[in-house]
Image: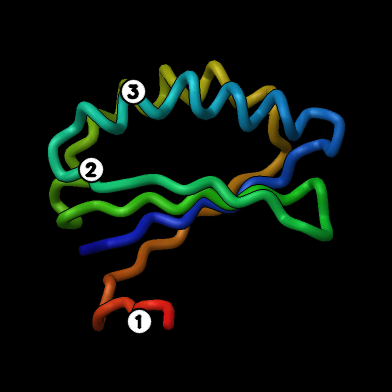
Amino acid sequence: MVVELLRFTIPAHLREEFIECDGRIWNEALSSHPGFISKELWSDLVDPTRVVIKVHWETMGQWKSFPHHIIEELDAKMCHLYTALSCEEYEVRGDAVPAK
């Protein structure tokens, strides 16, 4: 399994609009793509300008096969809501530890 970690910097007054827009625009597109497992959106508890999105994929190949033209089309609907974006890639190594 691989994880795509997206870090956004957002004007604080646009955070709720960004969160709503992300769910409306990206969730359906991701969930219909082969290899997509799950997505989480984290809003920073201290800094209202920071949002992190974590996407789990079955394989790197399935993630990278998401059509680039669709990424550009969907991102164009949201790019006015953030000022910076970085992307990191991780391979999941080991099992999750269950809560006690």
Separation of residues labelled 2 and 1 (CA atoms)? 22 Å
Q: Nearer the viewer, residue 59 or 99?
A: 99
User: Dot 1: what SS?
Assistant: loop
Task: Give coordinates of residue 13: x percent, y percent.
Answer: 86, 31
Quadrant location of residue 4?
bottom left
Locate the C terminus by quadrant. Answer: bottom left
Locate the N terminus by quadrant. Answer: bottom left
Q: Residues within 10 Å of mark 2 (few under 14, many from 20)?
A: some
**Pointer 2 with pointer 1, Cβ within 8 A:** no
Q: Earlier in the sequence, mark 3 or mark 2?
A: 3
Separation of residues labelled 3 and 1 (CA atoms)? 29 Å
Query: How many discs appear?
Result: 3
How does the figure colour the protein chain or chains?
rainbow
Q: Which residue is mark 1?
A: 97
Q: Which residue is mark 2?
A: 36
Quadrant location of residue 28?
top left
Task: Give coordinates of residue 71: x percent, y percent.
Answer: 37, 28
Q: Earlier in the sequence, mark 2 or mark 1?
A: 2
Quadrant location of residue 59?
bottom left
The kind of residue on which mark 3 rests is Glu
**Pointer 3 with pointer 1, Cβ within 8 A:** no
